[in-house]
Amino acid sequence: MVKELNGQDDSIKLFSTTASLSNDSPRNFSEAMKGENRKAWKEAMDNELASLKTMDVWVEVPENWANQVLGTRWVYTSKRDPAGNIIRHKARVVVQGYRQIQGLNFDETFAPTPTFASLRSLFAIASANGWEVQTFDVTTAYLHSSIAEYIFVRPPPGLSVLSGTVLKLRKALYGLKQAGRCWWRHLRAILERLGFQANDEDQSTYTYNKGEERAMLWMHVDDGVITASSKALMIRLRNVLSHEPKLKWDTGIHSVVGINVRRIGNRFELSQPALIRKLCNLSPSNITAEQPLPIINLSSEKAAKIDKEYLSRIGMLLYIAQATRPDIMFSVNFLARFSMNTTLKHWAALDHLIAYMRGSMDKALVIQSNGQDKTLEVYIDANWGGEGSRSQHGFIVFLLGAPVAWNSKRQSCVASSTCQAEYMAMSFVAKAGTWISRNIAAITGNITPILLSDNQSAIKIAADSGSRKNSRHFQREFHLINEWVTNNHVRIKWISSENQKADIFTKKLAKIKVDMFCKGIVV
């Protein structure tokens, strides 16, 4: 299974960033009971304990039964609407799973995480076909799945049990190392019984393919997004999905995993104003900028220590860039290189990028099919040379005319020419195009990726129609693209440099070129 889109993990692992929006939540039981919202938190804890009892999560047993007893604690979060307003207080009992011992009370822990590329592909397919999209969340998701191991825990603060007893777990309580895996396998078994199949490329994305009926389901833990080829199918799937486990449905789609989603006809607009606002509040200023990076030279220098504040801002920006803002992808990756050796120059460049975000806070990524034939276009570009003589390449993938994946990456070895840098980029990026093609094949049928490059020499070598005399020194791994072109797994076409949409992922650009890229993509 390919989890990376050309070297950068596109799976969703940065939810601590989203969760940090609710930084007014208490850190522990004592704070919750002393704060001004103690009644709301008390109610949230009572609701959680009631759910645990209903789900038969644990049973009291004598403590001498246990070979190890793990602690528990409360974790408090606030669910917010797209504007950042609190709509519900949530409290969860979490096991201190960091004390688990492999082979004693856990073994396998792998659970897949979904990719943004799959989510945006779902929106692109819904846009192209005019399909309805709905969202749901699973109530107490992990608590539906059983565990095989013997695990004993102490009661959380505020819950009384008989003296000399502990709690033996029957269900996969939050915090256990294997909890995510238990839930994923439980949910997958349910969905397969209902006719869904997990995609090999993204095992948190499921497709339903029966006769003329099609549906696509994207899951992140307990949050689901589904589109279906007809209203009748959507109603039927809603009914069968709601039998097990318990779901809360939302008609249409308004937000998912911290991303605001606005649908106008067959146009989806994805934005993250609340997170950008939080980022800007960390650097109070009224200054805005017209392009992501200032025109200054930056270099690596030795630093006395790691700057955690710089790292925190880079992490937030990376989440935004991966989710909704391809226009800052190169800038964030470039500034991330200096995370371990930050100087005042690097901070100035970071503040400049934040100023750019401040001035474009309400911009949204547009997912809208162009209504043309089924296409999967991959724009590729490379900038020869660079820091340490390694070239930078980047790409953006358009599925059915809508942007669904992008990245900017410094190449792993030195290229001796522009042609070699572009040829190496083709081999890297072809993997992303074919990954997306396979990921959506059950819904759209087979679509051959078309790689769009502005380097004629690299295209000729890849297509086996040019001399290999000057490419004999290329590493063997980069000739993958030649094999795929020969076997019709991908196609390559030339595109003029003026129309090369991947240029923004390879270098710093002036405002006019940034605006050209954003036209119709980030508005």
Image (cartoon, rainbow, N blue to C red):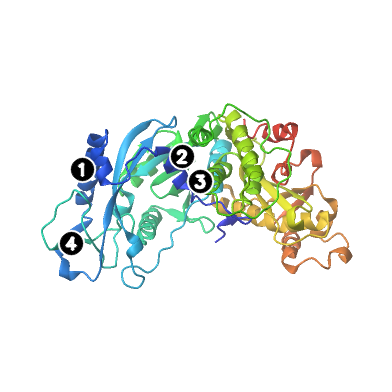
Question: Mark 1 touching mark 3, by CB under 8 A?
Answer: no
Q: Compare marks 4 and 3 and give the one earlier in the sequence.
A: 4
Query: Which dot marks residue 46?
Result: 1
Q: Which x, y percent locates residue 495?
A: 79, 44
Q: Say left or right for 173 vs 330.
A: left
Residue at 47% over, 41% down: 228
Between 471 and 83, the residue placed more toward the observer is 83
Label 3 sits on residue? 212
Density class for disc 1 (Cα within 10 Å; few <14, some 14-19, many ≥20) is some
Residue at far bottom of view: 103
Residue nearest the observer in this picture, 370 or 158: 158
Q: Nearer the viewer, mark 4 or mark 2?
A: 4
Residue ID for mark 2: 258
Residue at position x 49%, y 36% from top? Answer: 275
User: Considering only order in the chain, which callout, 2 or 3, is on the residue closer to the N terminus?
Assistant: 3
Please say if the residues under marks 3 and 2 sit with CB atoms less than 8 Å apart. Answer: no
The CA span between labels 4 and 3 is: 54 Å
Answer with mark 4 or mark 2, whichever residue precedes in sequence: 4
Amino acid under disc 2: Gly
In this view, the mark in front (1 or 3): 1
Which quadrant holds the C terminus?
top right
